[in-house]
Amino acid sequence: MPIAITRGLSPAIVRCELTHIERQPIDLAAARAQHERYERTLAELGYELVRLPVEPELPDSVFVEDAAVVVDELAVITRPGAPSRRPETVAVEAALAAHRTLARHNEPATLDGGDVLRVGKRVFVGLTSRTNPEGIEQLRAALAPCGYTVEGVAVSGCLHLKSAVTQVGAGTVLVNPDWVDPSAFAPLLVMTVDPAEPAAANTLLLEKTLVVADAYPCTAVRLEGAGLTTVRLDMSELAKAEGALTCCSLLLND
Ligand code: CIR
């Protein structure tokens, strides 16, 4: 059964890292309800949930995706780009140890899992304020023996590569072309977000169902028009922490 690792929301999220957006008040109860709905959706779509304990002192710890890169053969524990986020890896590493051989990023490498998009054996890694060339190099060294090709991709205007592009179907990605050059993904089929919805590219593909944020209805209509089955979730409070759909889980397709 596939596993989804998640972690409950820390009340400290009000002090989260922000890079591209202004701080706005976060309604903790609403954020928690949205996160629980997200977890229920994963469970309904067949994932066994492994919920890590809340970390009251780690503001961004709900965004577990950034602490590791998981493939079938191993998990790489990252060294997140924001120093405030580095302690988040401890509990994620302990949870993954039960399921995967582990590798680790070491200083001076930095890499956030949100910068890593795997499509089959191709692994795209965003070069961002969080992920440096050494982080990409160490990921390549860990994954190459398992047959993965690691491709660095320039990203601008958003936090992570997966803010700008995610996989939405077999052989298809959804891209915001203002933030990443779509030609990097050739020969994959490229769909684009609706221009009025720049942040819509972060979707979560679970088998044949695509989870999308309900803040981006025009892009959802494009995806549904292409024959994709979507589930729409309200992620508005987590978006105020610059988080989106992929960041709230680590998926192990066991
Ligand atoms: C941060 O800036 O690190 C958090 N406030 C948001 C992280 C979102 N993570 C993700 O998209 N993978």
Image (cartoon, grey):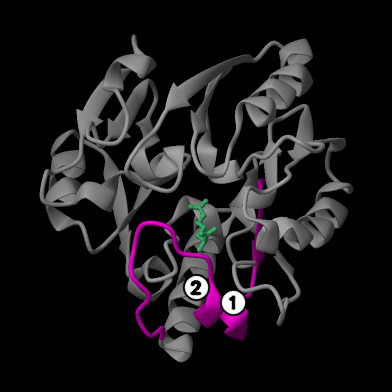
The residue range painted magenta reads 1-26
Q: In the rendering, at what x and y percent does residue 112 appear?
A: 60, 44
The Cα atoms of the two marked residues, 1 and 2, are separated by 8 Å
Tag 1 and tag 2, C-beta contact below 8 Å: yes
First in sequence: mark 1 or mark 2?
1
Seen from the viewer's position, the closer of residues 174 and 226 is: 174
Quarter residue 150 falls in: top right
Q: Label 1 is placed on what type of residue? A: Leu
Q: Is residue 12 above or below residue 73?
A: below
Q: Label 2 is placed on what type of residue? A: His
Q: Is residue 12 left or right of residue 157?
A: right
Seen from the viewer's position, the closer of residues 114 and 252 is: 114
Q: Which residue is mark 2?
A: 35
Name the residue at 54% across, 67% down.
39
Q: In the rendering, at what x and y percent does residue 76 appear?
A: 76, 36
Q: Is residue 81 left or right of residue 206?
A: right
Q: Is disc 2's CB within 8 Å of ligand 1?
A: no
Q: Which residue is mark 1?
A: 9
Disc nearest the viewer among 1 and 2:
1
19 inside magenta stretch: yes
Quarter residue 15 falls in: bottom right
Q: Is residue 49 visible?
A: no
